[in-house]
């Protein structure tokens, strides 16, 4: 199946949101599983919402996610242009061909007339449907209007009876009664195609074999197939995927302030972890495996295992997946996703690299994303602390004063401030006082850090520094 061709066709309206990226990943996996090609096409027919530089965002995002574009605006093949606004002449040519075939017609209705029609349908509480006012205009009327530059759109002539059906890989057979299909606009009065029309023309001319998109387009697909049929073209394989919903049950969207890929990336989530997590939103592998490399995903991906139900975007689960990838990072990689956040929130100008890497590595096993280091490491950048009730009660126990007094003496004897020497000091307290377990470690931790629990004690004490520890032990 090396002739498999899929396409990702985003609008250039800014950063890529999570639902959009998941669709791109599914499209990429379908193509690569079959040794096929993955095409990027930019759908900029909505010129009002177009954002400058958005195409570069899309390229940058896909590159970070290890999704290789085989053909697109920046690396064209032989079926371009790959930007819809550069294809206007192509759409007009095919719209006129449909008029010639009797499958579409010129519509010269004014906006005022259409508004009146819409109000009429609203009053009847019915879905709007164009009344075919221009369907049977004579050749002379049409030619006269065109000669006088009367604005027009081109509408698709829909069948008024019978059933249109198609098979979807996820949802099975879908049937729609033709009498509910409106004569949709194919070419707008500004010469730009509608989304529905441009998609069909582009997908056919670009040789797209598999169309993967959100299930909100299920009801539109019979219209697409009628266009394929009108031209005598073979329709592609359809794979409609369920929506990704936020934890509040609403569809994820940039407008609702939901995270885009770049938001997550800038917060220190790793692209390979984001890809891994997004694939699991709505797709289930044969076994219950949850951590995949891109190569494993390509090998194992089967679109028939995509769920019909919406998926809930769970940032906690994303954090869990991301933490698996963080644990495998080198010191340099870990530094790169955490240090910029530390530097932004705290004064680290007087800290050397050894101190910073000790701090970062202290939390490596519990870190879910880079920016989380800011909250986890907060105690190292605060001068004072307040004990909670539980700590105060614990410190009233017999023996805690003895442990603290002994530890202070051991710390004062340390020549070289190192983790090994601090560990030795704790062991000396154990030998001299006879206390062990929580009666040894907890009093020291509470007195030095202000918390009952925390990361490795000797490293924590080392990071606070000799002066601060002596000061706290003396209080």
Image: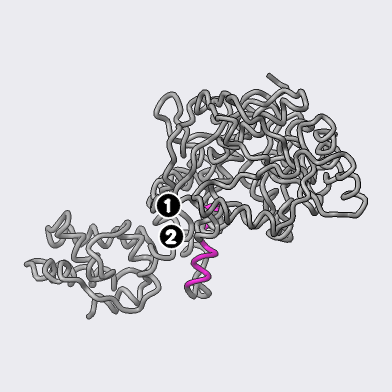
Residues at marks 1 and 2 touching, judged by CB atoms closer than 8 Å: yes
Give percent across and percent down for residue 236: 67, 26
Q: Which structural element holds mark 1?
A: loop
Q: Is residue 336 visible?
A: no
Q: Position of residue 417 (x, y in %)?
A: 38, 67
Q: Residue furthest right?
A: 147
Q: Residue at x 50, y 72 (%)?
A: 348
**Is residue 442 inside the magenta stretch?**
no
Is residue 333 found inside the magenta-colored segment of the image? yes
Q: Which mark is residue 372?
A: 2
| Apparent side of residue 335 relative to residue 284 in the rendered image (left or right) | right
Query: Please, what is the dominant secondary structure of the magenta stretch?
Result: helix
Q: Residue at x 65, y 34 (%)?
A: 223
Q: Nearer the viewer, residue 69 or 355?
A: 69
- Callout 1 environment at 10 Å: few (<14), some (14 to 19), or many (20+)? many
| Mark 1 lies on residue | 368
**Depth check, front residue: 355 or 245:** 245
Range of the magenta residues? Answer: 332-345
Quarter of the rendering occupied by the N terminus: top right
Vertical side of 133 occupied by 265: above or below: below
Question: Label 2's element?
Answer: helix
What percent of the width, then of the height, locates residue 232?
Answer: 76, 23
Q: Would you place residue 380 above or below residue 159 in this image?
A: below
Residue at point 72%, 47% (across, down): 43
Frontmost residue, 387 versus 137: 137
Q: Which mark is residue 308?
A: none
User: Residue 283, how many percent across, how many down?
Assistant: 47, 33
Residue at (60%, 29%) from the top-left corner? Answer: 238
Question: In terms of image quadrants, where is residue 375?
Answer: bottom left
């Amino acid at each position: 199946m090396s002739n498999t061709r899929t396409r990702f066709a985003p609008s250039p309206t800014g950063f890529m949101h999570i639902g959009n990226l998941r669709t791109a990943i599914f499209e990429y996996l379908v193509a690569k599983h079959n040794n096929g090609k993955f095409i990027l096409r930019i759908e900029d027919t909505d010129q009002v919402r177009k954002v400058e530089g958005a195409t570069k965002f899309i390229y940058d995002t896909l590159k970070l996610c290890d999704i290789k574009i085989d053909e697109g605006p920046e690396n064209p093949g032989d079926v371009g242009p790959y930007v819809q606004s550069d294809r206007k002449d192509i759409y007009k040519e095919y719209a006129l061909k449909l008029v010639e075939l009797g499958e579409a017609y010129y519509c010269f209705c004014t906006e005022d007339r259409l508004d009146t029609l819409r109000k009429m349908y609203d009053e009847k509480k019915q879905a709007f449907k164009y009344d075919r006012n221009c369907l049977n205009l004579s050749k002379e009327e049409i030619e006269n209007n065109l000669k006088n530059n009367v604005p027009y759109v081109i509408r698709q002539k829909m069948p008024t009876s019978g059933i249109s059906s198609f098979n979807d890989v996820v949802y099975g057979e879908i049937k729609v009664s033709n009498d509910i299909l409106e004569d949709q606009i194919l070419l707008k009065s500004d010469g730009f195609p509608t989304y529905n029309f441009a998609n069909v023309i582009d997908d056919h001319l670009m040789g797209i074999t598999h169309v993967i998109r959100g299930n909100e387009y299920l009801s539109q697909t019979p219209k697409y197939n009628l266009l394929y049929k009108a031209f005598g073209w073979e329709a592609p394989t359809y794979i409609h995927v369920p929506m990704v919903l936020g934890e509040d049950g609403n569809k994820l969207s940039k407008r609702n302030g939901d995270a885009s890929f770049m938001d997550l990336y800038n917060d220190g989530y790793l692209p390979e972890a984001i890809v891994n997590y997004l694939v699991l939103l709505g797709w289930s592998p044969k076994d219950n495996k949850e951590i995949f490399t891109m190569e494993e995903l390509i090998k194992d991906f089967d679109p028939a295992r995509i769920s019909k139900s919406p998926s809930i975007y769970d940032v906690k689960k994303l954090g869990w997946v991301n933490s698996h990838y963080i644990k495998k990072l080198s010191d340099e990689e870990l530094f790169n996703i955490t240090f910029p956040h530390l530097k932004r929130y705290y004064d680290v100008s007087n800290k050397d690299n050894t101190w910073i890497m000790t701090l970062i590595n202290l939390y490596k096993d519990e870190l879910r994303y880079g920016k989380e280091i800011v909250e986890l490491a907060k105690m190292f950048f605060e001068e004072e602390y307040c004990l909670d009730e539980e700590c105060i009660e614990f410190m009233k126990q017999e023996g805690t004063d003895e442990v603290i007094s002994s530890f202070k003496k051991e710390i004062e004897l340390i020549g070289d401030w190192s983790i090994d020497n601090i560990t030795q000091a704790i062991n000396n307290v154990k030998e001299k006082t006879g206390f062990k377990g929580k009666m040894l470690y907890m009093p020291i931790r509470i007195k030095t850090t202000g918390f009952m629990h925390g990361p490795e004690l000797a490293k924590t004490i080392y990071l606070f520094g000799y002066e601060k520890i002596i000061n706290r032990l003396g209080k």
